Image: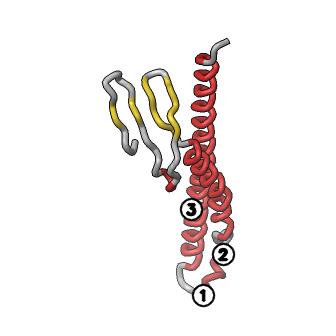
Amino acid sequence: MAGAQSWPGGGVHATVETVFGVPRSRQVEMGMGDFTVNFEALEQCRTELSGQAGPMAAAADGLPAGVSAGSFGDLDGAAGLADAVNAFSEAVGVEIDKAGERLTQVGVAVEAVIDSVRGTDQHNVRCLTPA
């Protein structure tokens, strides 16, 4: 964590002010000490991840598929070359699909972190508010 500091009480103060250049953070009390959470940076990270998942998946759309030996004319070994191109395109497509899925999963995980920290923060506020 950028700027992480240990406190005598055993808590950790983590400053994430520089994530994506967003300067604001705010203090959130949590079970074992205090740490700073920059919700704007987390939201921006989630938005960026969500925005990249679609284009990543679409990157495989332009890969050659079903290349035939005739694509290489009268070359000796044209069938082998066509098979290699098809296998390569399929393998790259699988990896691109995996990358798109990972981007989506990380975006969902970041959103879960945001929800969890906000929920804990709201719970702490309710516990500290006089009835």
- For numbered disc 3, what is the local secondary structure? helix
Q: Residue at x 33, y 31 (%)?
A: 6
Q: Nearer the viewer, mark 2 or mark 3?
A: 3
Q: Amino acid at mark 3?
A: Val
The residue carrying mark 1 is: 74
Disc 2 designates what residue? 68
In terms of image quadrants, where is residue 123?
top right
Identity, as a three-letter code, of the amino acid under mark 1: Asp
Residue wearing tag 3: 92
**Quadrant holding the C terminus:** top right
Mark 1 or 3: the one toward you: 3
Residue 97 pos. (x, y %): 62, 55
- Dot 2 amino acid type: Ser
Please report whichever mark, 1 or 3, sits nearer to the chain's N-terminal start: 1
Crowdedness near tag 2: few (<14), some (14–19) or many (≥20) residues, C-alpha within 10 Å: some
**Nearer the viewer's eye, disc 1 or disc 2?**
2
Q: Is residue 59 left or right of residue 80?
A: right
- Tag 2, which secondary structure? loop
